[in-house]
Image (cartoon, rainbow, N blue to C red):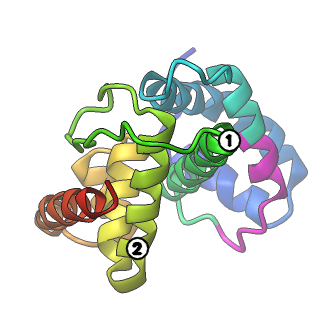
Amino acid sequence: MHPQPDADITQLLRAWGNGDGGALERLTPVVYQELLRMARGYMRRESPDNTLQPTALVHEAYLKLVDAKVAQWQDRAHFFAVSARLMRRILVDSARTRLAGKRGGGAVRVELNDSIDAAALKNEQMVRLDDALEALAQFDPRKASVVELRFFGGLGVEETAEVLKISAQTVMRDWRLARVWLANEMDKTR
């Protein structure tokens, strides 16, 4: 199967957003492999005690996407950004559930790097990172979005810039500043 051009995906997303159920049926096989790639990237960073499989993560996110009330999909990048946010929420909620009787020490600093293949995050690390990212979003939502799209969504600099409608240089500047801020914030909660 040949990759679907971004314009075709965008057209299907917009048709789906306008209520065309057939567009969703045509869109699903086109975006499934990319969603699965994203889910595998997430799962590589997950704690070994997480029993959720990438396909199950995709299916749970897909169900939430179908129920989502997005007025208008902007384009392919917007769709995958929303998908990344949903997968992050599912995994963080799962980590919080697993932690619910396991309070204690042993927290380790989390390094945010450019690699989607970053080392696995333990439940505590995933929750601490999510908490720090939520705190960042309170006073600088754009920087929080950059981290979410790049680290969790696996989007590149150009794709992130496209989604957020900012320059690639701004993405890189926000990325560097957000990483420093998040590291400091996470050190405070150790």
Mark 1 is on which residue type? Gly
Q: Is residue 116 shown above or below 150?
A: above
Q: Is residue 82 shown above or below 109?
A: below
Q: Is residue 127 left or right of residue 93?
A: left
Label 1 Cα neighbours within 10 Å, binned few <14 / some 14-19 / many ≥20 = few
Kindly identify the residue that appears in the image at 24 percent across and 57 percent down.
Answer: 187
Position of the N terminus, as image quadrant, is: top right
Most extreme residue toward the front is 104
Mark 2 is on which residue type? Ala
Residue span colored magenta: 61-72
Give 47 or 31, whichever is nearer the viewer: 47
Q: Picture coordinates of residue 61 (x, y %)?
A: 71, 42
| Quarter where residue 176 is shown | bottom left
Q: Is residue 69 magenta?
A: yes
Give 182 or 24, whichever is nearer the viewer: 182
Dot 1: element: loop
Q: Is residue 145 left or right of residue 176?
A: right
Kindly identify the residue that appears in the image at 31 percent across and 25 percent down.
Answer: 119
In the rendered image, which residue does mark 2 sit on?
135
In the rendered image, which residue does mark 1 sit on?
101
Kindly identify the residue that appears in the image at 67 percent across and 54 percent down.
Answer: 13
Q: Is residue 33 magenta?
A: no
